[in-house]
Amino acid sequence: MTKTPTAAAYLADLTTRIGRLYDDNAEAIALAAAAVERTAKADGLVYVFGTGHSHTMAEEAHYRAGGLALTVPILAATTMVHEGAVAGTVFERMSGIVAPIFARYPIGPNDVLIVVSNSGVNTATVEAALIGKTIGATVVAITSEAYSKVAAQGRTRLADVADIVLDNGAPPGDATINLPGSKLRVGPVSTSIGAALMNAVFVEAAARLQSAGGAAPIYLSANMPGAKEVNEALVDRYRPRNPHL
């Protein structure tokens, strides 16, 4: 059998980081879940925005089997990686690019805006959080406190603006494993941990909604019995406010 010690080390490190997420974020998870619960009860929406690879958190939440149907991804090619990753890296550092993107989405004071940025200092994500605050939405950040403190160098951090901060615990540079005989590091963790944190908030909110006697708006996997009827009803409910359905 071929040994894979580096792969094992990476997975062990990732497992350890995920294992301590709750202890490190228990209060923030509870606050974020309560915000999502309030939003659901007010028939509001949960918007998710990130740039670069962090935009995948918005897609993770969107039309997700076992996920909340009230989530809306904020997507624009200029801040993503599929139509020009190099250009996107430039755009996410430019002031003013977020406002016209957000104009497409009717975010209101009853809504939650989740902004994801591992480094926590890019202009687009900080401006996104400021827009959410101005509107009166509850702004939740998923970020690395350690990375953002190193990267800030006097700049405003996403964590400074958000109402609630979920710390993914990723190291500066988002690489966890040293390559032998090299100064290079590999093994990013922010995506895996970010998805786990966000879904922890959603499952807690869904459980609270269900316990309160309401029906949590949850998509079913398309291959499960009854999924077609359940999902069609949810799409009919949210499509007028979600341009990506």
Image (cartoon, rainbow, N blue to C red):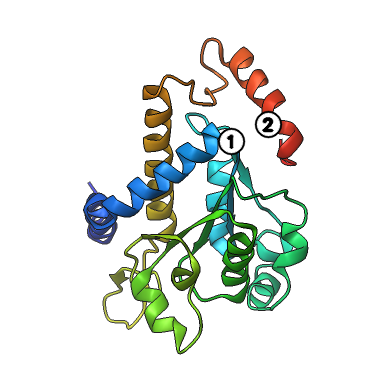
**Is residue 55 shown above or below 93?**
above
**Which residue is identified by label 1?**
70
Identify the residue at the far top of this view.
225
Q: Which residue is mark 2?
A: 238
Residue 86 position, x and y percent, is: 66, 74
User: Dot 1: few (<14), some (14–19), or many (≥20) neighbours within 10 Å?
Assistant: many
x and y percentages locating residue 44 in the rendered image: 60, 39
Which residue is most to the bottom? 154
The CA span between labels 1 and 2 is: 7 Å
Q: Residue at x 38, y 31 (%)?
A: 208
The disc, 1 or 2, on the residue closer to the chain's N-terminal end is 1
Question: Which percent across, then down, holds residue 159?
Answer: 44, 69
Classify mark 1: helix, strand or loop.
loop
227 shown above or below 147: above
| Cβ atoms at labels 1 and 2 below 8 Å apart | yes
Residue in the picture at 54% in, 18% down? 223
Residue at image position (38%, 67%) is 144
Q: How many marks?
A: 2
Amino acid on which the number 2 mark rests in the picture: Tyr
